[in-house]
Image: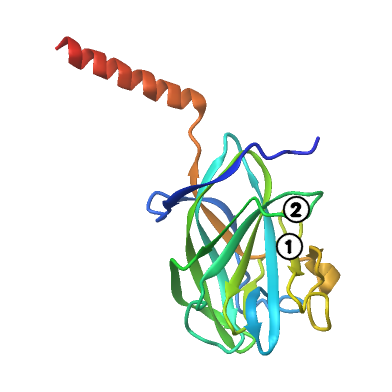
Amino acid sequence: MKRVAIAALTVAALGTGANAIDLWVQAPIGPTQSGSPVPAWSISKGNVSGLDLVREGANDFVVGGPGWNINQLVMRGVFFDGADRNPTGGFEVSFYANNGGAPANTALSTQVSTAITRSGSQGNYVGRNAYDFTIDLTTVSLGPGTYWVSLMALDTTNFFWVVAQNVVGNEAHLRDTGPEGGGTNSYPTAWTKVSDIGGDPQDFGITIRGEVVPEPATLAAVGLGLAALAARRRRK
C-alpha cells in the first residue's frame, strides 16, 4: 500500500537547531572518491553565465511515526568558481510528497533561508574546495511517510550539491523548470533520476535535523502531570 503523508505544514518560527537531533543522515562522498560521472550536480537558480537556470535537485527520506519537526539541513556543496562564501541569496528549500518513487510536481512547502553556517573546507572536488552548509529553517512538520527535500542555491555562479556515499531508497532526482530547462547541457523539465541524465545511480549527501513529534500518549501524560501539580498547589 502506498504511504500517504499525514500532514505537512510550516510554523512561523525560525528553527535555530539548538535542540535538533539527526533525523536522517546520508554521508557525502570524500574528496578521494571521485564518483561517476561527477561528484556533484548543479542546483542553481538565477542568471548563471547568461543562462536563466532553475536547476533543482531532490533526495528522498522516510519519516517514522508519529512524525518529525524539521528545522535544519546540512549539505555539502561547491561553487564552480571555487568561491569561499555562501550563496548570495541563500538556499531555496522545498519539501515534496512522494509520487511513485519521484517527487510530486507541486511542493508541500517552500522557503528561502539565508541563515546559513559554512564550515571549513571538506576537501577538494574537481579542483575546487567544498564546504558543509548548515541551513536553518522555519520548522516544517511532517507526518509518517516518504518525502523529498530539494535545494537550489540562489546565486549567479553555478553551485553543485555533492553526492552521497550510497543510494538509500529512491535515487536522487533533478529538473530544470527555467527557460533553459530541457535544452542542451541542461536537465529535463520533468523530475528525472540522475542515472537517466548520465552516470551511475546516485543520491545526495544530506543530513536532516529536528525533533521527533511527541507521541499523543506522552502529551496526554504530560498534561495530566501538570494538572495534578496545579491541583496539589491549590490544595496547599
Residue pictured at 83% horizontal, 80% vertical = 183
Residue picked out by circle 2: 104
Residue pictured at 74% horizontal, 52% vertical = 169
Of residues 97 and 221, the one drawn nearer to the viewer in this rendering: 97
Residue picked out by circle 1: 172
Regarding mark 2 in the picture, which secondary structure is present there? loop
Regarding mark 1 in the picture, which secondary structure is present there? loop
Q: Position of residue 8 (x, y in %)?
A: 60, 44
Q: Is residue 132 above or below residue 221?
A: below
Residue pictured at 55% horizontal, 88% vertical = 82
Of residues 153 and 76, the one drawn nearer to the viewer in this rendering: 153
Compared across the picture, whether 6 is left or right of 100 comes to left
- Which class describes the residues within 10 Å of circle 2: few (<14), some (14-19), or many (20+)? some
Of residues 206 and 99, the one drawn nearer to the viewer in this rendering: 99
Tell me which amino acid carries mark 2: Ala
Q: Residue furthest front?
A: 179
- The circle on residue 222 is none
Tell me which amino acid carries mark 1: Ala
Q: Position of residue 144 (x, y in %)?
A: 64, 38
Q: Residue furthest top?
A: 235
Q: Is residue 214 above or below residue 54?
A: above
N-term mark: 2 or 1: 2
Quarter that holds the C terminus: top left
Q: Is residue 68 above or below residue 76?
A: above
Quarter that holds the N terminus: top right
Q: How many marks?
A: 2
Compared across the picture, whether 141 is left or right of 37 comes to left
- Which class describes the residues within 10 Å of circle 1: few (<14), some (14-19), or many (20+)? many
Real-space CA distance between mark 2 and mark 1, rounded to the nearest whole angstrom: 13 Å
Q: Position of residue 177 (x, y in %)?
A: 75, 69
